[in-house]
Image (tube, rainbow, N blue to C red):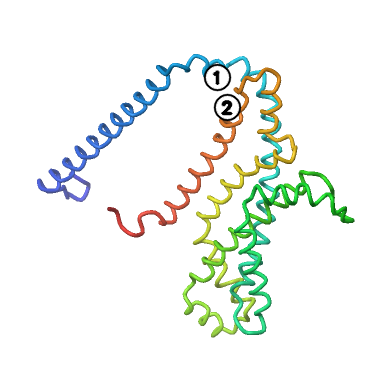
Amino acid sequence: MTADGWQPSAVQRERDSYRRRRTVRSAVVAAASTLVLVGLAATAIVTSPGWERVQQTYFSWDKAVDSFPAVLEGLWLNIRVMLVCALLILLLSLLIAVMRTIRGPVAFPLRLLGTVYVDVFRGLPLLLVLFLLGFGGPALDLSGLPRSALFWGGAALVLSYSAYVAEVFRAGIESVHPSQRLAGRALGLSYGQNLRFVVLPQAWRRVLPPLMNDLVSLQKDSGLIAVLGVIDAIRAAQIETASDFNYTPYVVAGVLFISLTIPMARATDYYARKQGFHGAGGML
């Protein structure tokens, strides 16, 4: 009985008991099915004819310990590239999204420029952009710009990802109801003030989860700069592998990337749940 004398009815107690039994039953079934699936997969791998050779080639503990410092140092480069590129991508993509949402015939060149940019860099494979800029950029010998592969590889990441992120920003901006813009204009706000204080705060809240997903993808794709010879985590693993053709350093690099990606993904899910983005359409 509670402090005010109220206590649930017999029907309510039976309903709560039924829900608890359903929850426990669901947890037991989920755990059992997961164990069965993992067990079957593990059995299939361990009992395969080539498992012993794969174990020696990909899961050598001594090789993992030896290669870990070099791969970790390369991963630190990946993290720095991701952070710098992410900041530049946010600024450039937001500018492109605003250019694409400006109304009026006088702004047509800006909308056309933004549309062409998105169409071109969203249509080109990232690996192709890396090759074109990584090998062609230094050959231009532009004054004031470095010739390092790291710079041009980062530029390729920024150009490609900005096209995708700009569309995410544009979707968020256009999702703001027109009444919000009209209310801002009725209060005497200029176009820029309306965009800054009314539209962008609402758009930012709505696009933050997909932006986090793009950040996770950027963290993984930062490893593609290894094709230009930059010694990141993947390139470091390749160098370590070349000495004895033991591929354990690749597994080490994969584990390190996953150790970064999973917390970022869970942080995105947590924020989405906290903001009520999950389940907004009802549970099925």
In screen coordinates, is 145 left or right of 249? Answer: right
The quadrant the N terminus occupies is top left
Question: Which residue is located at x 54 percent, y 69 percent?
Answer: 173
Please, what secondary structure does the residue beneath circle 1 have?
A: loop
Give how far across and how far down residue 186 sits, in percent: 54, 85
Residue 251, numbered label: 2
In screen coordinates, is 245 left or right of 20? Answer: right
Quadrant location of residue 43?
A: top left
Give how far across and how far down residue 176 sits, in percent: 49, 71
- Label count reads 2
Which kind of residue does numbered mark 1 sit on?
Answer: Phe
Spatial CA distance of label 1 from label 2 is 8 Å
Instruction: Say whether marks 1 and 2 touch (CB < 8 Å).
Output: yes
Question: Which residue is located at x 68 percent, y 61 percent?
Answer: 92
Please, what secondary structure does the residue beneath circle 2 have?
A: helix
Which kind of residue does numbered mark 2 sit on?
Answer: Val
Give how far across and how far down residue 225 sits, in percent: 70, 42
Residue 59, numbered label: 1
Q: Residue furthest front?
A: 49
Quadrant location of residue 64?
A: top right
Q: Residues within 10 Å of mark 1 (few under 14, many from 20)?
A: some
Give how far across and how far down residue 271 sits, in percent: 47, 51
Quadrant location of residue 20?
A: top left
Q: Residues within 10 Å of mark 2 (few under 14, many from 20)?
A: some
Q: Is residue 86 above or below residue 41?
A: below
Q: Nearer the viewer, residue 141 or 83?
A: 141
